[in-house]
Each structure stands twice: as C-alpha cells, then as structure tokens.
Image (tube, rainbow, N blue to C red):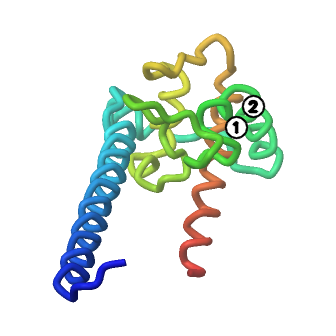
Amino acid sequence: MLKSPLKQILAIVALIFLLAIATLFAVQSVKEKKDLKDKNVKSSAISLEKARTRNPVLATPQSITAGEKIYKQYCKQCHGDRAIRDSTCVCTATFCPADLRNPHLWKDGEGFVYWTLQEGRKPMPSFRGKLTDRQCWDVVNYLHSLTKEKVTEEEKK
C-alpha cells in the first residue's frame, strides 16, 4: 500500500493518464471502422443515372417476402441477418459490407442497390444471371422496407 500522499497522488495521476490513452486508442479504432464503413457506401462505381433507375416492382407484402427469402439465401452471409452491421456481419481489416439499412445508401434512389446487385462490387459478386430482374427488385423492396423500419425505430427514441 502506498503510504506517502505524494505517492498516492502520483499513482492516481498515472492511472488517469493510462485511462486517457486507452480511451484515445478506442476512439481512434471506432473512427477508423466508421471511416471504412462510410467509404464502402460511397465508393461504388454506380452512375447517378443508373442509381436513379425507377423500381418497376411495387413494394407489396409478396414482393418484400420474396426479397427476404432471396436475401437470406444470397446476402445474409456477408451483410448479416437483418442487413445491418452486427455480430453476424463479416467485417475484415480492409473491408466491411455495406450497412444496407443506412439511409445514405438510398439517397440517390433504389436503382443504386439494384445496379449494385446486377454489377457486383469487389468482393461482392455480380448477381446478373443468378437472379432475374424481378428478383433483384424484390430484394431492393425488402431492403428498403428494413430502412424504413430503422428510420421509424430511430424516430421513437
């Protein structure tokens, strides 16, 4: 046990210093992950014209259900069970799949997600030839429904 008041003060100052350093490293790590995640949403090669492609499939309950089934078969392995980064998402040191419930993903239109499915984006493969146009639009409708749920959840907070 420290007997001298000076030693006690120095020990407290050292502890505070170590906690401050640990906090800085934790904040930097979170910031780097956030920057990587934001970069992955912004860095797609989808043109604005393609991103604004209109969705020809109405977002009916049937379309959303069909899209959910396709999502679970082809997409959930990387993007997670509910298309949001959580413990089921496969982030690595250099890449993190897009958070598909992020409203920024939809700012240019549903066509952005449709064309990303069609053309792929490394390391995500192209689904052209694997999924029909209708199936891609069903996935878009499903994902967009999740985004609307997220916005509603955040409004309730």
Whole-percent x, y for residue 113 in the image: 51, 36
On the image, numbered disc 2 is attached to which residue?
70
SS at circle 1 = helix
Q: Nearer the viewer, residue 64 or 20?
A: 20
Asked whether, in this view, residue 10 is left or right of residue 64, the answer is left
Residue 152 image-quadrant placement = bottom right
Residue 128 vertical position relative to residue 47 in the rendered view, above or below: above
**N-terminal label among 2 and 1:** 2
Residue 73 vertical position relative to residue 157 in the rendered view, above or below: above
Asked whether, in this view, residue 104 is left or right of residue 12, the answer is right
User: In the image as oriented, which residue stretches furthest toward the top?
Assistant: 129
Q: Amino acid at mark 2?
A: Ile
Whole-percent x, y for residue 21 in the image: 24, 60
State yes or no: discs 2 and 1 in contact (Cβ < 8 Å).
yes
Mark 2–mark 1 Cα distance, whole angstroms, equals 8 Å
Whole-percent x, y for residue 127 in the image: 60, 18
Which quadrant of the figure contains the N terminus? Answer: bottom left
Q: Nearer the viewer, residue 36 or 69?
A: 36
Q: Amino acid at mark 1?
A: Asp
On the image, numbered disc 1 is attached to which residue?
138
